[in-house]
Image (cartoon, helix red, strand yellow):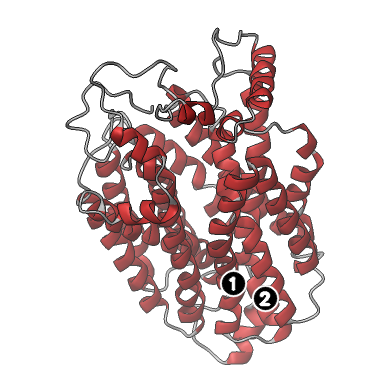
Amino acid sequence: MGFGKFQILVLAYAGMGWVSEAMEMMLLSFIGPAVQSLWGLSSHEESLITSVVFVGMLVGAYSWGVVSDKYGRRKGFLITAIVTAAAGFLSALSPNYISLIILRCLVGLGLGGGPVLCAWFLEFIPAPNRGTWMVVFQAFWTVGTIFEASLAWFVMPTLGWRWLLALSSLPSSFLLLFYGLTPESPRYLCLKGRKSEALGVLEKIARMNGAKVPCGTLVSDHEIELAGNSIPTEDTQLLPPKAGEDTTSREMNSNAGGISSLLKLLSPELVRSTTLLWAVFFGNAFSYYGLVLLTTELHNGHNTCGPSELQSGNSQGVSYKDVFITTFAEFPGLLLAAATVDRFGRKISMSIIFFVCCFFLLPLVFHQPQGLTTGLLFGARICITATFTVMYIYAPEIYPTSVRSTGVGVASSVGRIGGMICPLVAVGLVHGCHQTAAIILFEIVIFVSGICVLFFPLETKGRDLSDSISSSKQTNKPVLS
């Protein structure tokens, strides 16, 4: 039924959730310095405000995925929106450091459900358009970061950090406001045998898109299993298997459970891709969120060694203009990813951009004038945004359908670990007058990530997504686009 008005509305709703997550993550670079000055926190206590959010996200990434698979996509992102909005607003009322830490951890728990919205959105998108719309969907993150930087620029100097926390929780509240209009995924409904409800959603899509529901009978997965057939992929026609067609591997893939999927990620065929993917996701998250924090730390006086009183007095001197400028780097980062990912391929694009990022950060080993520091961070932010975007396109392409969601989900969780650690470097070392050591560590992580990309076993540019780990014996098998 194509891509039409229905998908645009779904994109707008899911995009609002992505904007919400970006704002909650971006504000971490502003809240830490403000609270550190107000409550006299140490650098480790300040960095913990950021780290606990990633701890919550690590738990939430698993929890909400299970909830959405069992009870539905809508209920999954409903609960995440409630947790994020409530904890985000209550954190603005935190009376002390401990309560702020607990509430920000709960915010992270809610933010961990972000992939549920992404999966819900993609299940409405025609297979040939998914690559393009993934980049468009990622642009909502960039909009969120820029909006948060703008909001902080106007709110922080006058109203303070509590108002910034409260206002930043509003996008999650909008998800609750329009929740009643959101449809359930027809793929999920069919999986649960609720084909009459699925057909109702499909008919609604057809009406809004000005198309017709394809002829035929909608058959649920339960009926296919009872008939002894394998569960088809989304490009497979609902026809009996051809004579001599091997359906064993398809049945194994479709029935793979959580434990078997995890074991398959470390099978001889996939262990190389999996371990390298984990390393690159870790490096991307460590570097991206580290650069966000460095943008604040290198402009608030904490990167200069001096008496503690002087540092405390300068902690409020965040240059919101410079933070706003560097945040705008995400737009050219998206354009860079879009321009290179198909022309030069995933591997070469990511690797070269990682190395260019090292080039931009290298001068920051030494203290630089504020204008030059802003320019260098702007260039580095372009590069790391581009690698993150290409990584999210490449990762699903290297896994077979049976373990695709598990593979990308586990890799994303490893990235959360990088997010937990980066505040110790971007905040802790810079506060301790060790800017050189902090930049060198970021250089090492980014450089190693670029090397790991070169060792990926295959280039997926122009390659169909396979339903099998080893496709050499399945030349006539339908593939998932």
Given the image, on which type of amino acid does mark 2 rest?
Ile
Residue 17: image x %, image y %?
66, 45
Which residue is disc 1 drawn over?
A: 52
- For the residues marked 2 and 1, what is the alpha-carbon distance in whole angstroms? 7 Å
Left of 182 or right of it: where is 371? Answer: left
Residue 320 in view here: no
As displayed, is residue 36 above or below residue 264?
below
Residue 320: image x %, image y %?
64, 60
Q: Residue furthest left?
A: 472
Q: What secondary structure is marked by label 1?
A: helix
Asked if the residues shown at circle 2 and circle 1 are in contact, with their CB atoms under 8 angstroms apart, the answer is yes
Residue 88, by quadrant, is bottom right
Check disc 1: other Cα within 10 Å, few if <14, some if 14-19, many if 20+: many
Residue 86, by quadrant, is bottom right
Which residue is disc 2 drawn over?
A: 101
Q: Quadrant of the C terminus?
A: top left
Task: Please tell me which residue is depicted at 68% across the width and 66% down the height of the picture.
Answer: 106
Residue 154: image x %, image y %?
75, 56
Given the image, on which type of amino acid does mark 1 rest?
Val
